[in-house]
Image: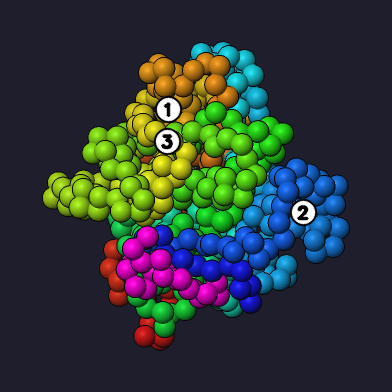
């Protein structure tokens, strides 16, 4: 067991700690989110981030070389929670690039050389989620998990399904009926996960999966959503790669789409740790971009002025907003289906990240998202709609003169453009291929490996029966 690492409640009035090999997604005492914390002074100390550069020449050879090949684990000294290197489940994730996007910079009014795109769609399952899944699966292997599950707007399910098949665990994914993009659904099926299409949206799916994984431990289901603090350890590596590409200098800004707010939370933690370890000179500013139809963070942070406040954030203000949403039967709605979420579970950690990185939050409408998605593809490599919220947010922040054309800005393009072909085709041709698909006659699949999704009502008993777990009750 690694006793220099622990799980710790983020509530400063609680601070309860748990061993690293416990399986938890919330503090048992106060219900707050958990962090993975390290006693850095009991671990080998790093003098400089340039230490990591030697791994480009050692990648691929032996066990350590397998880890050096990964864009997550080549920074393993920054996430030393695992017991031995054999625990680590990796497929060579995180080998992504930071592109200097001069043509796009000119289009949006940035100086050439100053707009950088971090293409996380280049991960093996096509989204940034692989950075987190490799870490959470390594923890799952460490604790002997056999069954893993998530609720998802699509990318988490694709990534979970891929790692579950690699790690020989049973993968279980809950998605909202009709809510996820075609590319993502096809991946979950292809990698062999049991895919439940629940009648409801992401928020409903997450509520159900938490009930099943957290409140019913007898079912033995390990939860892989970003409330799992190990996921966020892996996602810190996106920031290390940006620093590495800039010769260990920070950009002025990092811009990221906000959905369940795991990614921005991980970025804040990465910089908090690097600052405390004296490994960076400057912390970049953070801009989190919501879609207007899924704008909880913007509402909470920009309109209601809720701040981290040393961990004593205004829970009543957020509770009031959620009660008003329930009252109005409000559901998130945006073309950027990946971020169609109204109750982001990592909200407190996102507030902390905004504090650490002197952040701002904005929302952008669907029309801007679609135009920016198309602009990225026209001048670069392409991304899915949610990812393009970063460019739409950048345009807004340039217009407000919050960001200057001479700032160095890194936009995180979270998912590959082929994830959501329907949106792209509809944008260019006006033809709604998704509507056509919905009306197509249903036929039995005949392939020997066919793995059909299972339709289920948003009902606990029905869900447990569908996953074949009734016997464990
Ligand atoms: N971009 C893409 C492409 C995503 O898939 C997601 C989240 C986000 C941005 C937002 O990231 O949740 O860390 O704030 N997708 C999750 C999923 C919710 O289920 O695939 P976040």
The one of 257 and 467 positioned closer to us in this rendering: 257
Q: From this viewpoint, is residue 345 visible?
A: yes
User: Which quarter of the figure is the N terminus placed in?
Assistant: bottom right
**Residue drawn at (65%, 38%) of the image:** 243
Reading the image, the residue beneath label 3 is 359
Q: Is mark 3 within 8 Å of ligand 1?
A: no
- Asked if the residues shown at circle 3 and circle 1 are in contact, with their CB atoms under 8 angstroms apart, the answer is no
Give the CA distance from mark 3 to mark 1. Answer: 13 Å
Q: Is 235 positioned to the left or the right of 180 in the image?
A: right
Spatial CA distance of label 3 from label 2 is 32 Å
Question: In the image shown, does 296 or 176 lie closer to the viewer?
Answer: 296
Callout 2 crowding tier (Cα within 10 Å): few <14, some 14–19, many ≥20:
many
> Magenta part of the protein: which range?
12-31
- Give the mark nearest the N terminus, 3 or 1: 3
Select label 3 or label 2 by which is in front. Answer: 3
Element carrying mark 3: loop
Residue 450 lies, in percent from the top left, at 56, 62
Quarter location, residue 402: top left
Say few, some or many: other residues with alpha carbon within 10 Å of mark 3 (under 14 / 14 to 19 / 20 or more). many
* Residue 461 coordinates in the image, percent (x, y): 30, 75
Residue marked by disc 1: 393
Q: Is residue 390 left or right of residue 138?
A: left
Q: Which residue is mark 2?
A: 68
Magenta span: predominant SS is loop
Whichever of labels 1 and 2 marks the residue nearer the N terminus, that label is 2
């Amino acid at each position: 067991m690694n006793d220099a690492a622990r799980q710790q409640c983020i509530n400063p009035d609680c601070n309860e700690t748990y061993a690293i090999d416990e399986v938890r997604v919330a503090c048992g005492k106060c219900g707050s989110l958990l962090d993975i914390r390290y006693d850095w002074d009991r671990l080998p100390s790093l003098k400089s981030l340039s230490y990591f550069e030697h791994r480009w020449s050692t990648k691929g050879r032996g066990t350590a070389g397998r880890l050096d090949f990964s864009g997550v684990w080549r920074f393993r000294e920054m996430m030393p929670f695992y017991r031995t290197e054999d625990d680590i489940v990796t497929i060579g994730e995180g080998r992504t690039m930071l592109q200097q996007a001069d043509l796009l910079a000119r289009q949006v009014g940035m100086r050439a050389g100053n707009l950088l795109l971090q293409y996380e769609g280049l991960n093996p399952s096509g989204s940034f989620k692989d950075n987190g899944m490799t870490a959470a699966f390594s923890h799952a292997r460490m604790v002997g998990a056999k069954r893993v599950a998530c609720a998802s707007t699509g990318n988490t399910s694709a990534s979970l399904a891929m790692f579950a098949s690699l790690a020989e665990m049973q993968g279980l994914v809950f998605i909202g009926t009709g809510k996820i993009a075609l590319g993502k659904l096809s991946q979950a099926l292809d990698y062999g996960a049991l895919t439940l299409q629940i009648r409801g949206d992401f928020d409903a799916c997450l509520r159900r999966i938490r009930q099943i994984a957290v409140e019913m431990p007898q079912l033995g289901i390990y939860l892989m959503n970003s409330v799992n603090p190990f996921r966020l350890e892996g996602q810190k590596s996106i920031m290390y790669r940006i620093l590495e590409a800039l010769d260990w200098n920070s950009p002025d800004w990092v811009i990221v789409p906000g959905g369940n707010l795991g990614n921005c939370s991980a970025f804040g933690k990465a910089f908090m740790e690097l600052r405390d370890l004296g490994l960076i000179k400057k912390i970049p500013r953070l801009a989190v971009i919501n879609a207007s139809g899924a704008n909880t963070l913007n509402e909470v942070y920009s309109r209601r002025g809720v701040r981290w406040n040393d961990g004593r954030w205004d829970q009543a203000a957020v509770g009031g907003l959620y009660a008003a949403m329930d009252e109005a039967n409000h559901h998130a709605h945006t073309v950027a289906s990946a971020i169609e979420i109204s109750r982001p579970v990592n909200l407190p950690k996102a507030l902390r990240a905004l504090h650490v990185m002197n952040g701002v939050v904005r929302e952008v409408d669907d029309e801007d998202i679609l135009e920016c998605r198309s602009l990225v593809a026209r001048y670069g490599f392409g991304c899915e709609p949610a990812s393009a919220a970063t460019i739409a947010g950048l345009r807004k922040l340039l217009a407000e003169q919050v960001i200057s054309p001479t700032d160095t800005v890194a936009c995180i393009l979270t998912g590959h453009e082929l994830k959501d072909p329907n949106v792209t085709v509809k944008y260019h041709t006006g033809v709604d291929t998704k509507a056509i698909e919905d009306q197509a006659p249903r036929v039995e699949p005949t392939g020997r490996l066919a793995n059909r999704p299972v339709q289920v009502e948003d009902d606990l008993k029905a869900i447990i029966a569908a996953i074949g777990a009734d016997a464990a009750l």
